[in-house]
């Protein structure tokens, strides 16, 4: 049976590294994997989304609305923006961090309130964690992505923890490996 996961965030948050770690775990476990990355205005703080499909036979990485089993969001507003892609019974894992998009920065709009409540009210299974605080505790705010991979690995323990740890080791640059290993462990502790 194939599964579909989306990783969404804002440019510069490390969504691509997260997709590499997840892809590494899936391939190491013998799954066929297809990944597609879509960059909006990612270098200007715009939306970034990565589609990951895996299973016994996967033909296309593209995920349509209502097809995602899991969405991992690096930012709260991005969680709300992409939740229509979840299938019924799907799960949304989000960082509670708020990064203001350009219309909010310029004062043309305000950041929406009560996003978590609205997502839950829509019937979505939601896990919201302060991944930024955990990343900072690990030693770098840039390791939010690896914290969220730790959360995912604990919530969906289909794959051995050791596979995840090995993937972090293989995908993260050596100079920041220790921080990211801590970030992964702290992510697992959040749930």
Image (cartoon, rainbow, N blue to C red):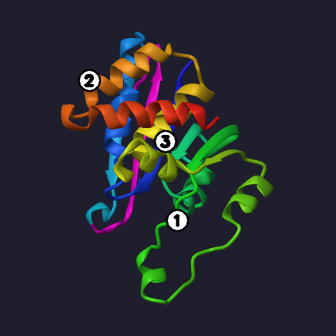
Instruction: Work out how far the residue at label 2 is from the one at label 3, CA to CA, in angstroms.
Output: 22 Å
Residue drawn at the location 61% of the way across and 52% of the way down = 83
What is the total number of numbered labels drawn onto the structure image? 3
Residue drawn at the location 51% of the way across and 15% of the way down = 159
Label 1, residues with CA under 10 Å away: few <14, some 14-19, many ≥20: few
Instruction: Work out how far the residue at label 1 is from the one at label 3, CA to CA, in angstroms.
Output: 19 Å
Magenta stretch bounds: 44-63
Q: Earlier in the sequence, mark 2 or mark 1?
A: 1
Q: Which residue is mark 3?
A: 6
Q: Nearer the viewer, residue 129 or 83?
A: 129
Q: Mark 1: which secondary structure?
A: loop
Q: Earlier in the sequence, mark 1 or mark 3?
A: 3
State the mark number for residue 98.
Answer: 1
In percent of width and height, residue 153 lies at 53, 26
Q: Residue furthest top?
A: 30
Tell which tag, 1 or 3, sits nearer the viewer.
Answer: 1
Judge whether residue 141 is colored magenta: no
Q: Mark 2: which secondary structure?
A: helix
Q: Mark 3: which secondary structure?
A: strand
Q: Are marks 2 and 1 in contact (CB under 8 Å)?
A: no
Vertical position of residue 103 compared to residue 90: above or below:
below
Q: Nearer the viewer, residue 143 or 27?
A: 143
């Amino acid at each position: 049976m194939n599964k579909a996961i989306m990783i969404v965030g804002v440019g510069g948050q490390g969504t691509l590294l997260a997709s590499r770690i997840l892809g590494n775990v899936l391939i190491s476990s013998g799954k066929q994997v297809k990944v597609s990355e879509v960059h909006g205005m990612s270098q200007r703080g715009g939306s970034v989304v990565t589609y990951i499909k895996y299973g016994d036979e996967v033909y296309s990485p593209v995920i349509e609305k209502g097809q995602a089993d899991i969405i991992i969001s690096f930012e709260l507003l991005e969680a709300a923006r992409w939740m229509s892609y979840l299938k019924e019974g799907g799960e949304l894992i989000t960082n509670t961090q708020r990064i203001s998009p350009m219309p909010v920065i310029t004062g043309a709009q305000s950041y929406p309130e009560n996003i978590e409540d609205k997502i839950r009210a829509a019937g979505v299974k939601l896990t919201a964690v302060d991944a930024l605080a955990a990343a900072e505790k690990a030693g770098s705010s840039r390791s939010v992505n690896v914290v969220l991979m730790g959360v995912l690995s604990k919530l969906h323990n289909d794959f051995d923890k050791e596979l995840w740890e090995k993937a972090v080791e293989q995908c993260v640059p050596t100079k920041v490996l220790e921080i990211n290993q801590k970030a992964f462990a702290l992510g697992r502790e959040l749930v």
